Amino acid sequence: MRKIVASISFLILLAFLLFIAVKLHPFGEPEEREMDDYFIKGYYNETQNKVIGGAQNESGANNVVTAVVFDYRGFDTLGEATVLFSAVTGVAALFRRLRRGMMEEKRSEAERKEEGLSKIVKTITNIFYPLILIFGLYVILHGHLTPGGGFQGGAVVASAFALVAIAYGKLIVPKFLNKEKMSVVETSGLVGFIGLAFLGLTTTFFFNFLAVGRTPPLSWLSGTVPLWGPNPGALNTGGVLPFMNLAVGAEVLAGLGIIVLFMLVGLLPEEYEEQKEEEKK
Amino acid sequence: MIGNFPFVAVALLIALGFYTLLFKRNLIKIVIGIELIECGVNLFLITLGYVKGAVAPIYTHTLAPAERMVLPTPQALTLTSIVIGLATTALMLSFAMLIYRRYNTADVSKMRLRG
């Protein structure tokens, strides 16, 4: 009975989805809607969509997606950063019983060396770890110029942590990925992001107060006019966007690092629990 | 000419995800189903904003000022959705790990409340 009802509802859903897919506007020809309708009069390039035309002059960022994420739709990103923070908190809370076990150092040095994958993997990890870190930091720093930003760069850095975690195993990693420092970095990233948003309160929440010509004494910081076309990169453009990228990057890399650490240590907790029970006896 | 095929692909992805949710009872498979729905939604947002023959909305990479660009807002929303999806997936997998450890099974139908 249950299966019949499930099959019927599934078929109805599939029919609806396919109907929508066929009836939607033709692929590649989206309509202009009010969703993209924010601009300061006279700023935007008439031939383009309003966000695209205005992004360079209003927020001073060459990467329009970053301009939308941190400037036009900052509230979405605020919610996103909060969801990420609470998910990390949830993972940490689920594995809270393991916290005591994972910081203990009961294993001998020889046992630590045996842990993890083969020597080849460890050597390659040693070579690639700094390269991945540098690439991730590059993606974070150039978020307003090239594809990328705080979220993507933070994920790249966290993937370096995951690489170390897989190669070296769970005995060394808790020492290497310090949970306390990570949580400090994560929290300060989120607080910095919200603080930057509050600094714009002279006009509105999430106002890009550093963008082209808005605070003249600070223009050298990041308020210069962005260059057009292929360029070596003018890092000091984009107003508050580079700083928001940095803050969000710190939050994401530390948050995902905490998730990697907790899930890795949570993988095989039985022995720790056995140890605890033995201690009780 | 590919017509509306990307939208059909989105519909099939989401339908696959719902199929997994409805008919599978393994916790890991349920997480995979939720992930499939999420991928479908991400693909849907990206395909919605696509403009034929347009370039990525980044001025550093464009050559001529008049080049058409794809819509940036759906891409920004997809970015949001990807990161939230990653975090919630980690949370769901953590739940699955703990449930498996408590009941010694990943099958939802075999779990009974055990105080």
Image (cartoon, rainbow, N blue to C red):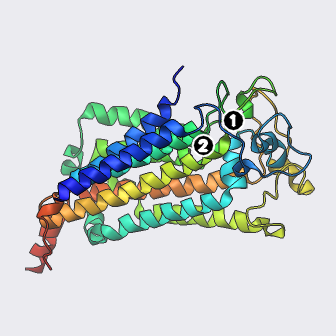
Quadrant of residue B64 in the image? top right
Q: Which residue is mark 1?
A: B57
Q: Position of residue A221 (x, y in %)?
A: 81, 50
Quadrant of residue B89 in the image? bottom left
Q: Position of residue A89 (x, y in %)?
A: 42, 68
Specify whether A109 is left or right of A215: left
Q: Position of residue A173 (x, y in %)?
A: 33, 53
Badge 1 vs badge 2, beta-carbon distance below 8 Å: yes
Give the residue drawn at x 21%, y 46%. Answer: A115
Whether residue B26 appears in this view of the structure is no
Give the residue drawn at x 54%, y 44%. Answer: A152
* Residue at mark 2: chain: B
Label 1 or label 2, whichever comes before in sequence order: 1
Using the image as rendered, state which of residue A119 and residue A233 is in the foreground. A233
Q: Amino acid at mark 2?
A: Gln
Q: Is residue B8 placed above or below B81 in the rendered structure?
A: above
Specify whether B4 is left or right of A70: left
Q: Which mark is residue B75?
A: 2
Give the SS element for disc 1. loop
Specify whether B12 is left or right of A68: left
Q: Quadrant of the N terminus of chain A?
A: bottom left
Q: Position of residue A44 (x, y in %)?
A: 86, 42
* Residue at mark 1: chain: B
Q: Is residue A210 placed above or below A100 in the rendered structure?
A: above
- Near mark 2 (Cα within 10 A), the count class, few <14, some 14-19 or many ≥20, is many
Whether residue A28 appears in this view of the structure is yes
Give the residue drawn at x 76%, y 45%. Answer: A51
Give the CA separation, mark 1 to mark 2: 10 Å
Q: Amino acid at mark 1?
A: Pro
List the single residue furthest toward the left.
Answer: A281
Quadrant of residue A205 in the image? bottom right
Give the residue drawn at x 72%, y 48%. Answer: A36
